[in-house]
Amino acid sequence: MEKLRIDKWLWAARFYKTRSLATEEIDKGRVRVNDLEVKPAKEVKVGDSVTLRQGPATRTLTVRSISDKRGGAPQAQLMYEETEASLKLRAQLTEQRQLEPASSHEHGRPTKRDRRSLDKVSKANNTSWGSRWSASAD
């Protein structure tokens, strides 16, 4: 086998759990082959450069082998080689994420203390829960 569709290769190399997820990411423009946007039917061959975005990280890979069968993770890792620049960028992003403070208080459900301060502000602005519009027939 010399060539294979990019969506099948990404699935076989275990970058995406299903071929349909790989196809969606390709259609969104998050996968490039040899620095060109591609369609899911684009064929890749050994030596091609594949760039894909996974979350905040962009990975640049070189295709080392072609297989249309999805195997285990050790077999999948033999299908590609990640470039040095890509590895450095991923390491920087990981380090940056670890250094950022956890933002648990900024998102999610407010604490009891936060709730009381919100109630104080809403009473000061005359925007209590009772004055909100509701679907009840008053």
Image: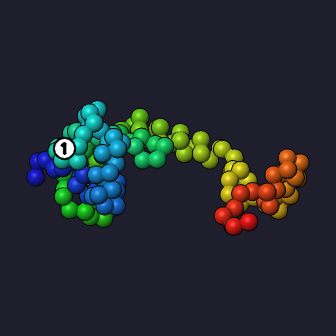
Q: Nearer the viewer, residue 100 or 41?
A: 41
Secondary structure at badge 1 equals loop
Figure quadrant of the C terminus: bottom right
Looking at the image, which residue sits at the far top? 35
Left or right? Give the position of 20 relative to 105.
Answer: left
Disc 1 marks a residue whose amino acid type is Lys
Which residue is identified by label 1?
A: 42
Q: Residue at x 85, y 50 (%)?
A: 126
Q: Nearer the viewer, residue 63 or 101?
A: 101
Q: Residue at x 16, y 45 (%)?
A: 43
Task: Tally the numbered discs.
Answer: 1
Q: Is residue 14 visible?
A: no
Q: Tell me if mark 1 has few (under 14), some (14-19) or many (20+) residues whose alpha carbon lies within 10 angstroms of its own.
A: few
* Quadrant of the rendered image containing residue 15: bottom left
| Residue 92, horizontal then vertical, whole percent | 53, 39
Which colouring convention does the figure follow?
A: rainbow
Q: Residue at x 24, y 40 (%)?
A: 38
Looking at the image, which residue sits at the far left? 1
Left or right? Give the position of 115 relative to 60.
Answer: right
| Residue 6, horizontal then vertical, whole percent | 23, 48
| Residue 44, horizontal then vertical, whole percent | 19, 44
* Quadrant of the rendered image containing residue 50: top left
Q: Is residue 21 visible?
A: yes
| Residue 25, horizontal then vertical, whole percent | 34, 48
Q: Residue at x 49, y 43 (%)?
A: 56
Left or right? Give the position of 87 relative to 108.
Answer: left
Looking at the image, which residue sits at the far front? 138
